[in-house]
Amino acid sequence: MSVESQKIKAAQIAEIKEKLEKAESAVIIDYMGATVEEATNMRKQLRDANVDYTVYKNTLIAKAIEGTKFEGLKDVLSGPSALAVSYDDAIAPIRVLSGVMKQYNKMAFKSCVVEGILYDEAGCQSLASIPSRDELIAKFMGSIQSPVGKMVRTFQAIADAKAE
């Protein structure tokens, strides 16, 4: 192996480590079967969700995750693998990738680590159904707003009845 090749690999390992140090979650998928157009669309959706998606060699990922909370992903690093990393919404990569997988009926989860917990393929699928933070806040606000609105309308009806 040439010195140049070793430098490139070391730089890629450092790049992966840097991403994982800031990450809330990391997902490994088998990306085979996707056309160029489908992959481009998937990458756009992931970018829009602020998810970093890159295809690396399995050996580089394995070296980068050694000694980190993502080390459990090492067991699924065989065959074609891509790494999706999220820095703020831990479920975002899983949610986006799950939607893409359903849309194209291609690709598959291998494993993921969300907030330090390792999940297998079935675990990733179940996490995909969790609504986003914004959706949860909207639902919560709606549940608070409904009784308050009902109370306001009741008070208004009482005030209107007394005014007559």
Image (tube, grey):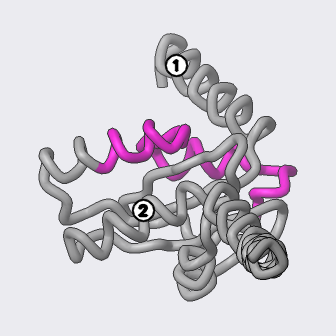
Q: Which residues are drawn in magenta?
A: 42-71
Q: Secondary structure at mark 1?
A: helix
Q: Is residue 51 magenta?
A: yes
Depth order, front residue of 60/19: 19
Residue tagged by mark 2? 97
Q: Quadrant of residue 9?
A: top right
Would residue 61 be found to the left or right of residue 119 on screen? left
70 relative to 83 in the view: left or right = right
Residue 118 appears in view: no
Label disc, if present, on residue 8 of the rendered structure? 1
- Element class at badge 2: helix
Q: Which residue is at the front of the view, 1 or 164?
A: 164
Distance in Å between CA atoms under marks 2 and 1: 29 Å
| Residue occupying the far front of the picture | 164
Check disc 1: other Cα within 10 Å, few if <14, some if 14-19, many if 20+. few
Horizontal and vertical percent for residue 24? 76, 50
Q: Is residue 6 above or below residue 158?
A: above
Q: Position of residue 155 (x, y in %)?
A: 83, 75
Image x and y of residue 107, in percent: 31, 69
> What count of labels does the image hold?
2
- Amino acid residing under circle 2: Leu
The answer to whether the residues at label 2 and label 1 have Cβ atoms under 8 Å apart is no
Is the residue marked by circle 2 packed among few (<14), some (14-19), or many (20+) residues within 10 Å? Answer: many
User: Does residue 23 appear anywhere in the picture?
Assistant: yes
First of labels 2, 1 by sequence position: 1
Q: Position of residue 33 (x, y in %)?
A: 19, 65
Residue drawn at x 56%, y 70% as measured from the top left? 76
At 33% from the left edge and 39% from the top edge, which residue is drawn? 44
| Amino acid type assigned to the residue bearing label 1 in the image | Ile
Residue at figure coordinates x 78%, y 36% from the top left: 22
